């Protein structure tokens, strides 16, 4: 089971890099279904498990000049306030409810990936998408 | 040319925009923090579109900046859960260290593969795992 979990970690990382999603969406079900952790323990552990991949990814993006460190720091600081709320919420919900909520979250991510694929966008949205998100005619008139 | 006045006007606008953007960025962080801790994920799926829609980042800058922010968010989440005694450090290393290698390989593969079919396959796979968690 440990070897399977490590292989799934490797696979999860490859898929995360390939599709531009975080590893967490794959780590949580791996920890629950393969290593038998509770949903709360799996979510807690997933947050620690994504750190090495995130650091590696941010370092790569930095080399391409894609990281606005000031903005990242402000978003990160703002998130610290939200994190405690999320932890309390996750622990207040029952295991079953939290696991089902996570399943719904997986469906939403699956749908958004499929939508992206059908629009045949590149994995990283182009500059055009920021225009499109403001409405079709915002900058094109 | 009215260069000086134009510069000062731009400077003023920059100042206003940056104050407003600090509040917006803090707001994005707050929402992402709740979401990240609730689901045990980084929250990029929330942060990237918000950086594009609310702050006007382009996609690449949003993706790179989101990764750096997630380092702080996920670290804070891990510490918060750790204080509650919910963290399994051995399991995190077992999955997280191979994943870091995989992520580097995945980004390299992304440059070489036509990912549309793969993305649809991945989407179906996530749906199947979601159903498995539901039942």
Image: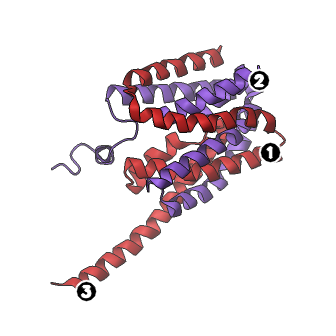
Chain colours: A purple, B red
- Residues flagged by tags 1 and 3 on a common chain: yes
- Residue at image mark 3: B4
- Residues A78 and B115: in front is B115
Quadrant of the image occupied by residue B18: bottom left
Residue under the image location 79 percent in, 39 percent down: B89
Q: Secondary structure at mark 3?
A: helix
* Residue A58 pos. (x, y %): 54, 50
**Badge 3 local density, few (<14 within 10 Å), some, or many (20+)?**
few
**Badge 2 local density, few (<14 within 10 Å), some, or many (20+)?**
few
- Residue found at the far right of this picture: B85
* Residue B117 pos. (x, y %): 39, 20
Q: Viewed as shown, does residue B47 lie left or right of A121?
A: right
* Residue A118 pos. (x, y %): 33, 25
Q: Is residue B73 visible?
A: yes
Q: Earlier in the sequence, mark 1 or mark 3?
A: 3
Q: Viewed as shown, does residue A90 lie left or right of B43?
A: right
Dot 2: chain letter: A
The answer to whether residue A80 is above or below residue B127 is below
Which numbered disc, 3 or 2, marks the residue closer to the eye? Answer: 2
Q: Which mark is residue A2?
A: 2
Q: CA distance from mark 1 to mark 3?
A: 55 Å
Residue under the image location 39 percent in, 49 percent down: B53
Q: Secondary structure at mark 2?
A: helix
Q: Viewed as shown, does residue A75 lie left or right of A140?
A: right
- Residue found at the far top of this picture: B135
Looking at the rendered image, the quarter that the N terminus of chain A falls into is top right
Q: Which mark is residue B82?
A: 1
Q: Secondary structure at mark 1?
A: helix
Residue under the image location 48 percent in, 37 percent down: B107
- Residues flagged by tags 3 and 2 on a common chain: no
Dot 3: chain letter: B
């Amino acid at each position: 089971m440990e070897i399977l979990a490590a292989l799934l970690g490797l696979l999860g990382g490859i898929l995360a890099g390939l599709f531009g999603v975080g590893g967490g969406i794959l780590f949580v079900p791996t920890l629950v279904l393969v290593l038998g952790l509770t949903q709360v323990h799996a979510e807690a552990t997933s947050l620690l498990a994504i750190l090495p991949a995130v650091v590696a990814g941010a370092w790569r993006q930095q080399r391409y000049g894609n990281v606005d460190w000031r903005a990242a720091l402000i978003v990160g600081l703002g998130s610290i306030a939200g994190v405690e709320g999320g932890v309390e919420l996750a622990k207040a919900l029952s295991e079953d409810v939290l696991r089902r909520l996570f399943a719904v979250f997986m469906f939403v991510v699956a749908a958004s990936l499929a939508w992206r694929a059908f629009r045949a966008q590149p994995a990283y949205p182009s500059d055009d998408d920021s225009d499109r998100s403001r409405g079709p005619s915002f900058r094109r008139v | 040319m009215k260069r000086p006045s134009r510069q000062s006007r731009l400077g003023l606008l920059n100042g206003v925009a940056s104050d407003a953007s600090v509040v917006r960025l803090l707001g994005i962080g707050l929402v992402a923090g709740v979401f990240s801790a609730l689901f045990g994920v980084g929250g990029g799926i929330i942060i990237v579109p918000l950086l594009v829609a609310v702050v006007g980042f382009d996609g690449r800058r949003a993706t790179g900046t989101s990764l750096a922010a997630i380092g702080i968010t996920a670290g804070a989440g891990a510490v918060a859960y750790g204080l509650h005694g919910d963290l399994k450090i051995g399991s995190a290393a077992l999955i997280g260290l191979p994943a870091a290698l995989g992520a580097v390989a995945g980004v390299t593969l992304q440059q070489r593969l036509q990912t549309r079919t793969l993305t649809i396959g991945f989407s179906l796979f996530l749906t199947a795992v979601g159903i498995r968690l539901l039942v």
